[in-house]
Amino acid sequence: EAITVGELAKQMGVKAAEVVKKLLLLGLPVTVNQAIDFDTAALVAAEFEYEVEKTGFEEEDILRTEEDRPEDLKPRPPVVTVMGHVDHGKTSLLDAIRHTNFTAEEAGGITQHIGAYHVKLDNGDVVFLDTPGHEAFTAMRARGARVTDIVVLVVAADDGVMQQTVEAINHARAANVPIIVAINKIDKPEANPDRVKRELAEHGLIPEEWGGDTIMVEVSAKKKIGIDDLLEMILLQAELMELKANPNKPARGRVIEAKLEKGRGPVATVLIQEGTLRVGDAYVCGVHYGRVRSLFNDRGQRISEAGPSMPVEVIGLSGVPMAGDDFAVVADEKQARMVAEHRLRKQREKELSRTTKITLEKLYEQIREGELKELNLIIKADVQGSLEALTDAVKRLKHPEIKINIIHGATGAINETDIMLASASNAIVIGFNVRPDSKVEDLAQREHVDVRFYNVIYQVINDIKDAMAGLLEPEY
Ligand code: GDP
């Protein structure tokens, strides 16, 4: 970590001008407030017979990963999250897929859910995250974790596109993750897949047979129809994406879930994203650290190593990490501990400084500094009519430097999922003719999300215009 010339001079008890002069003589013209690196500081300090010690450190120094060479990258299985409206069959589909692949014994009572499982197919493997829904997906994203490669959107053929179907579409899109549609419950007499396709088309998901590019598969989770087709399509999509990772380096991954277990201590399911994790490896995981005591796969079997895309239970942690936490193997336990402690300090500092994400007040500043190229908005309105009117008005707003995106618009109150989506996508939430809810406001505050309430369209548009021009008066 760098130090300014002024600070260095102060610590040595010499005049800043003296240090500046010495640096100039060393061929480095600098000003008092300029930061110099460790080596330069050490060099000039030596001139004053002082020694410079390195106290802080950058995580990257320890977690440094060299750029992978193309020939080191090997194909890895896709990681899939299942989403969809409640009762459309997400859980049933996950169970059906699990049963087609596990032996009766594995799929029976002895198999415990570890948060993800992987299926082996003739043409490759697929990994499914076991917690369906866009809420879990976006909560992970808000924590900086990008684990899902493909979203399978389940839509019941007897019910069609519903509110959470639309939410799921928008959450997947905000994350830039491709969607494969599973039209479920086709065994039901009242099933109407064509209606589902029409409704999905209205939301921009056009089936391939209609000239679009969205893969849609008709399935029945209950009668186990079309499951193999769906898996094939997932593999096909994955192939197009050319998912690759380097298995020959220290492992890195993300925590999918974690808990404290009787007799086992803290247990974390980690999805390996690159490298290979082995028993005995020292690692840092969020603000915790440890050495891998044992590893278990999704079938409850003890294993000695796990490569890219594999979910694995890790035993031997100093504490229980959080879902979404980063997991990284380091050279030894001492380094692991150093990074973990450093993170804990940083986390405390961050909590104190309350770094805010985007707000309308800070918009102008961020545009001017070139930090912001897009303004993401989430709009929740009381009725469809006002939602459409507001959406149209916002879409007509133009700014030479930033693009306005409405990443999600729906009727109804602002809910916790909206806040998490805003947090994950750096968006502002606008509530129109809807009332604040204290639980949601608390979450918004914790996630530093700007939520604004209006009941006049003109006012919303004016505020956004003013914000873009740097004219918005701060709210107190
Ligand atoms: P989730 O809320 O999306 O996880 O939905 P569930 O998997 O819990 O399923 C909701 C209900 O739909 C349950 O009663 C299931 O038995 C039923 N269900 C799920 N898939 C099918 C299907 O393919 N056909 C029929 N007929 N029922 C299904």
Image (spheres, rainbow, N blue to C red):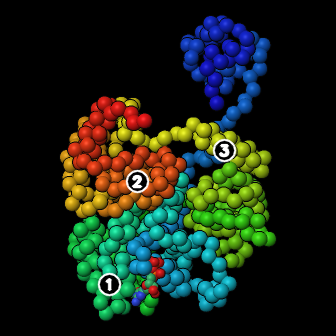
Picture coordinates of residue 247 (x, y %)? 60, 60
Q: Which mark is residue 158?
A: 1
User: Dot 2 lies on which element?
Assistant: loop
Q: Quadrant of residue 274?
A: bottom right
Q: Which mark is residue 343?
A: 3
Judge depth for marks 1 and 2 and give the one in front: 2
Q: Which amino acid type is marked by label 1?
A: Asp
Quadrant of the image containing the N terminus: top right
Q: Is residue 466 left or right of residue 116?
A: left
Front in this rendered view, residue 396 or 6: 396
Quadrant of the image containing the C terminus: top left
Picture coordinates of residue 355 (x, y %)? 52, 39
Q: Quadrant of residue 350?
A: top right
Q: Residue at x 73, y 63 (%)?
A: 266
Q: Which amino acid type is marked by label 2?
A: Pro
Judge depth for marks 3 and 1 and give the one in front: 1
Label whose residue precedes the other's in the sequence (3 or 1): 1
